[in-house]
Amino acid sequence: MKVDEKGNSRISTRALFRGTLLIGLGTLALVIVAISWFDHQAKEIRVAGRESTAKMMAEGVAIAIQDDVISENYAQIEGRLRQTLSDPQVLSILVADEDGKVLSHLQVDPATRNIKPIYSSSRVQVPTQSSEVLTVGDATTQWLQLVAGVPIGWLRLEIVGTKVDDALTNLRKQVTIWLLSACFVLLLSLGMVLWRTRGLIKMEEAVIQGRADALKKVAHHDSLTELPNRYLLLDRLGQAIASSNRNQTSFALCFIDLDGFKPVNDEHGHDAGDFVLREVARRLTACVRENDTVARLGGDEFVLILVDVEIASGIHTTLERILATIKKPIAIPEGVEVAISLSMGVTVFPDDLSSPDDLLNHADEAMYVAKNKGPGQYFFYQS
């Protein structure tokens, strides 16, 4: 009996060991398969995120340079490209005309981050599609056709991964070492890796989303005043037209040009001029309601969209309040006060039943009539 018990004991121990070994090997195989699958998924997420970032960056740059490409302002193009290259993720950027003739090509030295122009090729082979992305290793190249009504050229942007990508790669190497050297903590290690990697992926997604939000703001807002730019203004104007048609309401479009701004710039410098523009933007925003729009077209030109207005009384009260607010002296950083005013042209929809571009032109025409009447005046467009 004892022998049988010992034999049974040995058989049971052997079976237990074999079962434990099989469980260990099965767990190891499962972990390796799981890690390989997760590694593949993480790589796809990083590539997809980098490709998404490259596309959003390219679209933002395309909006910024399309006017300069049309006017062949190469110095301004290069200046905007250099601003883009300040992002540590960007390696190179190229702008070419529709036939592939290179207009500007800048590249960053990865080690020193010095920007240098590339003159090795005067012409490049452009894609057959309007947008094309290619990822090789850690680099992603985005081609984007520049369009301003008609195709006007091409933009090629090359970016690399972020520090989050490097952290994720190092983490995968550590996981492999842990698996080979400590099988008895496989499940625990896997849980830790999955949890930490999940956190890193969320961090990367947050970085990508933050970059997307930043690029969207750059593409749709004026960098000096942070007001909507012309692109976003036209979108808001289209929304106002649709709402007016749907709800049978009126809105006023006001085109503003500052009076007396040039002397401020000339006498006190551009920094003082920028301060005045920001203060005007702040005052205009304070004069209107939250659902109205204050936009800057550039220079000292602003545009207001005043929705749901009462033409008989409410609009005149608002316009007078705006004139009075802007006339108040502005204390610039030099310690002196400057005084400006504004001339404003107003057109009302649906009395002026025109397209967004025509509404802007009509308000602009009315503004010039107001300016000819003297500083601090407004005038309604008359068809």
Image (cartoon, rainbow, N blue to C red):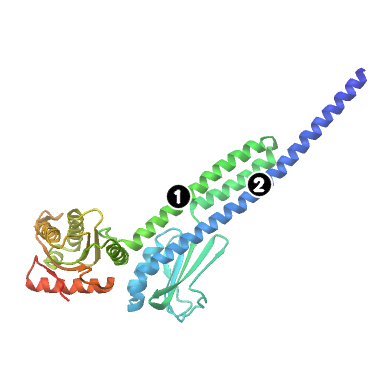
Residue 62 image-quadrant placement: bottom left
Residue 174 image-quadrant placement: top right
| Residue 277 locus on image (x, y percent) | 19, 60
Asked if residue 200 can be seen in this view, the reply is: yes
Identity, as a three-letter code, of the amino acid under mark 1: Ala
* Picture mark count: 2
Q: Badge 1 is on which residue?
A: 206
Residue 6's place in the image compared with 365, above or below, is: above
Residue 184's place in the image compared with 326, above or below, is: above
Q: Is residue 381 left or right of residue 110?
A: left
Q: Quadrant of the C terminus?
A: bottom left
Of all residues, the one furthest to the top in this rendering is 2
Residue 383's place in the image compared with 206, above or below, is: below
Q: Foreground: 255 or 56?
A: 255
| Residue 295 locus on image (x, y percent) | 25, 62
- Element at label 1: helix
- Element at label 2: helix
Q: Residues within 10 Å of mark 1 (few under 14, many from 20)?
A: few
Identity, as a three-letter code, of the amino acid under mark 2: Ala
Q: Is residue 61 left or right of residue 343?
A: right
Q: Which mark is residue 34?
A: 2
Asked if residue 109 can be seen in this view, the reply is: no
Of all residues, the one furthest to the bottom in this rendering is 99
Q: Residues within 10 Å of mark 2 (few under 14, many from 20)?
A: some
Q: Residue at x 78, y 38 (%)?
A: 22
